[in-house]
Image (spheres, helix red, strand yellow):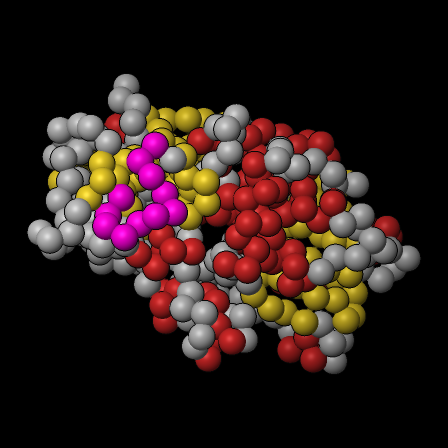
Amino acid sequence: MPTLHSNDASQSVIRVKDDVDTMKAAVYKGAKLVEVDTIPVPRIGRGEILIRVEACGICHTDLKKIAYDLLAPPRIYGHETAGVVAAVGSGVTKYIPGDRVIVFHHIPCGHCFYCLRKLYAQCPVYKRVGVTAGYEPAGGGFAQYVRVMDWIVERGVEKIPDGVSFDQACFVEPVNTCLKGVKLIDPQPEDVVAVLGQGPIGLIFTMMAARTGARIVATDTMESRRDLALRFGADTAFDPREEGFESRIKTMTDGRGADLVIVAASAKGIVEQAVRCTRPGARILLFAQTSHQERIEVSGAAICMEERTLFGSYSASVDIQKESADLVFSGALPVSDLISHRYPLNDIHQGITRALHPDELSLKIVVHPQRWA
C-alpha cells in the first residue's frame, strides 16, 4: 500500500503500512485506445479515503464512452468498485484501514430542485464524479487504488460483510440501478413483463421482476442467455428475431400484449419492438439507451392514441443504497452466477473486447486490479 500525501500538509492521513508511490491503471487515451500505465497513487485530503481496488465490473456505460469516444481523455473508467480501505484522511471516523467496502461514484446533494423531486441523477452534485484514480474523475475502478472524495465518503460507501467476496460485492452499484428501474415500473403479480435483452443487466432485471410474482417474458438472441433467464425466473424466453415474436406475446395475454416492458439492451429497433409487443396503456422503461448518438423512432399514435407511457431510468438512487446492498450481500439475488470471466488488470483489453463483442460463453466480466498475469 502506498506512502500517501494529503492535499494539505497540515492534514493527517491514517494509512496501512506500505511504501509504494505508483500503481498500475488502465488509462483511456482517446480514439478507442486504453493502455495500462504506471501512474502516481492518488493523494487524499481531509474527509477522503483511499481504496485498494480488488474487483471492478466492466459496465456497458463505460464501454460506450470508450467505443464512441464520448469523453475527452485521459480518463480512468470503472465504477463497479469493491476493495479495502488503504488509508483515511483526517476527520474520517466511519471507516478505518482494512475495512472491506464498495463505493458509489455518484451521490446527490439532497436539497436542490431535482433532489427534492427524487430525480437524483439530474442533481448537479450527482453529476460530479466523486471517485478517481487520477486525471478527470471517471470512476477509476480500472486501477489499483482510487481516491474517494468527502461527499461520497459521507453517504456513498457500504461495508462488505464477512463471507461476501469482492466479486459478488461489486454488483451492488448495478443492482441499485436495476432496483431503481423496477421500483419505477412497479410490476404487479398479475402483470406480464417483457424484459428485452438478457445480458448481465437484463438478467438482474429478470431476477428482480420474478420476485414480484409477475409473469416474465425474456428475450435475447443468445440461447445460453435465454436459458439463464428461465433459470432466474422467466416464464418463457424467445429469440427476438423469431418471426411472429410479438404475436406470441399477444397470444399469452388474450390478444392484448405485455403490460410492461423493460428495454435492457440497445440494439437497433428494440424500442420499436417494445412498443409493438405491448398493449394499449402499457408502460415501457428505457434503461440501456445512454448514448446521445442513439436515436429511436416510434409511431406517435402508438404513444398518444393508445396511451402508452415511454420513460427512462438512469444510474443509482441513494434512497435504495442499503436495500440494494442487502440484496447482493444476502445472496437473495445470485449475481455471482453471472460472472463468466475474470481478468487481471494487464489483460483488461481482452475483457473490454469480450464485453464489446459478447458470445454464448461470455456474460459479466470482472477486472482484478491487484492481479498481474
Quadrant location of residue 365?
top left
Quadrant location of residue 239?
top right
In the image, which residues are magenta? 88-98
Position in image of residue 69 (x %, y %): 29, 54
Could you tell me which residue is drawn at 56 percent across and 36 percent down?
A: 329
Note whether 75 is above or below 2 in the view shown: below
Could you tell me which residue is drawn at 55 percent across and 60 percent down?
A: 319
**Direction from residue 366 to residue 308 in the image, left or right:** right
Relative depth, front residue between 113 and 39? 113
Relative depth, front residue between 362 and 91? 91
The reply to whether the magenta stretch includes residue 97 is: yes
**Direction from residue 260 to residue 325 in the image, left or right:** left
**Direction from residue 47 to residue 352 in the image, left or right:** right
Quadrant location of residue 229?
top right
Residue furthest to the top: 373
Position in image of residue 23 (x %, y %): 18, 34
Could you tell me which residue is drawn at 20 percent across and 48 percent down?
A: 44
Residue furthest to the right: 254
The reply to whether the magenta stretch includes residue 330 is: no
**Direction from residue 175 to residue 54 in the image, left or right:** left
Position in image of residue 63 (x %, y %): 38, 47
Relative depth, front residue between 6 and 366? 6
